[in-house]
């Protein structure tokens, strides 16, 4: 099996910056005229794929950012009960739950809290977007495809979430 040159390794390292093959090729020292073609060619090279996988695994260990962790955060946003943040009283008043009383899973959905002209404003991350990202990850929105495998995977993910991963 052929080894990667230093320049090819540099491309792989640069590719992880923004996942843009052309820009990675330019930063690695390939000429502007050939950067696009070189980047595409290198992404198909088995040795480069293996090296990229190794680099991503090392980064995941170093940063403790894993696919499971990202999915868990998205699931917290997607499946949260927002009535835990505030309730509407009998006379239409809004009663916020003090933040120290909020469960950690609910705290994850808060994008911001600020005092505004009309009182306290709590904004949350987009629940529909989180559901969309989870659905895409699971392959739920592939047109014309049999989604039974994706639905089974969704059931597995939900079971893991309920069990606390």
Image (cartoon, grey):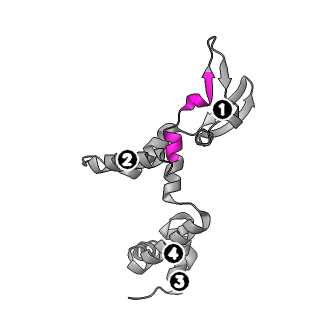
Tell me: residue 120, above or below residue 67.
Answer: above
Residue 68: in sight, yes or no? Answer: yes
Question: What span is colored magenta in the figure?
Answer: 74-87
Marks 2/1 in contact by CB < 8 Å: the verdict is no
Q: Say which of marks 1 and 4 sits in front.
A: 1
Which residue has dot 1 on it?
A: 122
Q: Tell whether 164 sits left or right of 154.
A: right
Which numbered disc flags the more N-terminal residue, 1 or 3?
3
In 3D space, how far apart are the residues under numbered discs 4 and 3 (Cα atoms)? 9 Å
Marks 1/3 in contact by CB < 8 Å: the verdict is no
Q: Please report the residue visible at 40 percent of the width from the left and 88 percent of the height from the top.
A: 2
Residue 35: in sight, yes or no? Answer: no
| Label drawn at residue 5 | none
Which residue has dot 2 on it?
A: 154
Q: Residues within 10 Å of mark 4 (few under 14, many from 20)?
A: many
In 3D space, how far apart are the residues under numbered discs 4 and 2 (Cα atoms)? 32 Å
Which numbered disc flags the more N-terminal residue, 4 or 3?
3
SS for dot 2: helix
Which numbered disc flags the more N-terminal residue, 2 or 3?
3
Which residue has dot 3 on it?
A: 7
């Amino acid at each position: 099996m052929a080894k990667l040159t230093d320049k090819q390794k540099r491309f792989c390292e640069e590719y992880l910056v923004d996942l843009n093959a052309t820009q990675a090729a330019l930063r690695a020292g390939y000429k502007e005229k050939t950067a696009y073609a070189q980047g595409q060619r290198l992404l198909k090279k088995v040795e480069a794929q293996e090296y990229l996988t190794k680099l991503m695994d090392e980064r995941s260990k170093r940063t403790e950012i894993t696919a499971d962790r990202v999915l868990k955060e998205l699931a917290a946003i997607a499946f949260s009960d927002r009535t835990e943040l505030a309730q509407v009283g009998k006379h239409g008043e809004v009663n916020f739950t003090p933040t120290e009383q909020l469960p950690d899973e609910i705290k994850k959905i808060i994008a911001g809290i600020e005092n505004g002209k009309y009182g306290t404003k709590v904004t949350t991350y987009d629940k529909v977007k989180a559901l969309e990202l989870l659905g895409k990850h699971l392959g739920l929105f592939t047109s014309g495809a049999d989604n039974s495998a994706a639905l089974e995977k969704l059931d597995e993910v939900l079971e893991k979430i309920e069990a606390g991963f």
